Each structure stands twice: as structure tokens, then as C-alpha cells.
Image (spheres, coloured by chain):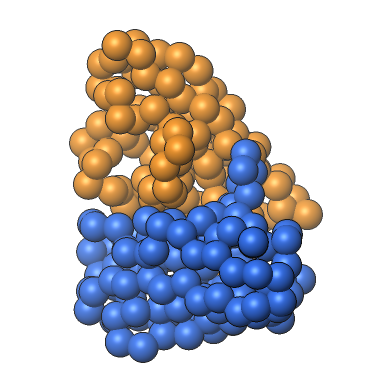
Chain colours: A orange, B blue
Amino acid sequence: QMQLVESGGGVVQLGRSLSLSCAASGFTFSNYPIHWVRQAPGKGLEWVALISYDGNNKYYADSVKGRFTISRDNSKNTLYLQMNSLRTEDTAVYYCAQNSWLPFFYFYSMDVWGQGTTVTVSS
Amino acid sequence: QSALTQPASVSGSPGQSITISCTGTSSDVGAYNYVSWYQQHPGKAPKLMIYDVTNRPSGVSNRFSGSKSGNTASLTISGLQAEDEADYYCSSYSSSSTEVFGTGTKVTVL
């Protein structure tokens, strides 16, 4: 069974950095693109970034472009999100998510989600 | 990368049908049949309910159905049940090589 588990969230000061991880299990991680999606308190879902199955292609929302970096280590079955120059508006629950039945296809519906990790940026 | 537009709330009585709209542009909803719908209960991760505009993943009730006309996609829940009370989000692939979510709709079962 495919499973995603996020970690690394916490409280961080304005302008500082934080790195999130997403550990995958139950499937061939290296075959699947994977997303980061976030949700600010009381707000809707916001797509953050996508990385291709091989890590060679990365896509970002305008709101995080130039500040966040998505990466993956297929040998460790782990996805990362390096967040720099954090702003108060980055406060959110961060989810990793992916599609389970269409390997290699970049943008597709997300049927596997982690439980989320909470990032709070304090001023 | 503007969010797709959904009504803030929709309500219905048990057994009734409700429809949630999701309006985008010719660069996202109108351009691709990659519209998905997600259900989210409080404190939980989203759950995929519809993909590729009209398809239901295995295990999702056939009370949920999707459609699209032009730049607007729709999710219909028929035979409304108490357990359907949740937030619902649409999403679409966009020509800017991004994914865009809707603003979200709170469904209330009266």
C-alpha cells in the first residue's frame, strides 16, 4: 500500500529557512512524480511544486518560485522541500501527494496524500 | 496562477442532489480534461473523488459525478448523506505547467 509520511515542520522565524521531508513506502518511488500542496489555517488548498520521477524537471507556484526548492532522493525514497526566506504567508500544513496508477505522468490527479506537517512562520 | 472559482458554500437536505461549480479559464479547465475533485473533512488530508472530469476512483460512491462545459466544471452529489458534509475542491492542470486548485466549497447537510 502506497504511503507518504511528511516530517520537518515546526515554528520558524520570519526570513529563516526550513526543510521538509516526505518518506514514501509501498511502491516504486522512482517511477512517480510527486507534489507538495499546502493549506494555510482556515484556507483552501494551494499547489506548491511538482518534481518529475527522475528529479530532472521541477515546477513551482509563482508564490514560492525562487524561495523554495523541491528535490528527491530516489535511493532513499524521500522527497524534500527546502524553504528559504520564509514569510508569514507560508504558514500552512504542507502535504506531499501523488498519483498511484499513472507512473511517469507529470501533472495528474492526486490519490495518495500524506497526513501533513505544520509550518508556522513567526514574526 | 489564479485560483479556480467555486461557491463558498452549498447546502442540501438528506436525499437531495447538489451541484458545485468550478470556473476557470481557457488556459486551465477549458483547455484540458484534467479536472479533479477532492473531498476534505476537518483535520484530514484531501481525498480524490473525481479525476479526468468524469471518472471515479475505485471505492468512491457512484453518488458523486463530474462534468464540464467550456471553462466550468461541476461536481454533483446525489442522494446527499450526512457523511458528505465536508469541504470540496476542484483542481486543474494549467498551460503554465502548474496545477491550480479551486477556492473551495463547504457542503452542509441540513
Task: Specify the quadrant that holds the N terminus of chain B.
Answer: bottom left
* Quadrant assignment, res A36: top left
Whether residue A104 can be seen here: no
> Where residue A19 sits: x, y (%)?
44, 24
Residue A40: x, y in percent? 42, 36
Residue drawn where x is 42% and y is 42% of the image: A43
Tell me if A32 is positioned left or right of A83 in this view.
right
Pick the quarter of the image with the C terminus of chain B.
bottom right
Nearest to the observer: residue B24 or residue B9: B9
Q: Can you say whether A63 is above or below B89 in the image? A: above
Whether residue B29 is visible here, answered yes or no, is yes
> In the depicted view, which residue is nearer to us: B67 or A68?
B67
Residue A24 percent across, percent down from the top left? 65, 43
Residue A22 occupies which quadrant of the picture? top right
- The residue positioned 76% from the left and 71% from the top of the image is B59
Could you tell me how many numbered marks the image carries?
A: 0
In the image, what residue occupies the spot 65% across and 69% down?
A: B13
Q: Residue at the location (45% across, 33% down)?
A: A41
The answer to whether B37 is drawn above or below residue A55 in the figure is: below
Find residue B61 and report its image quarter. Answer: bottom right
Q: Where is residue A103 in the image (x, y as percent from the top left)?
A: 57, 66
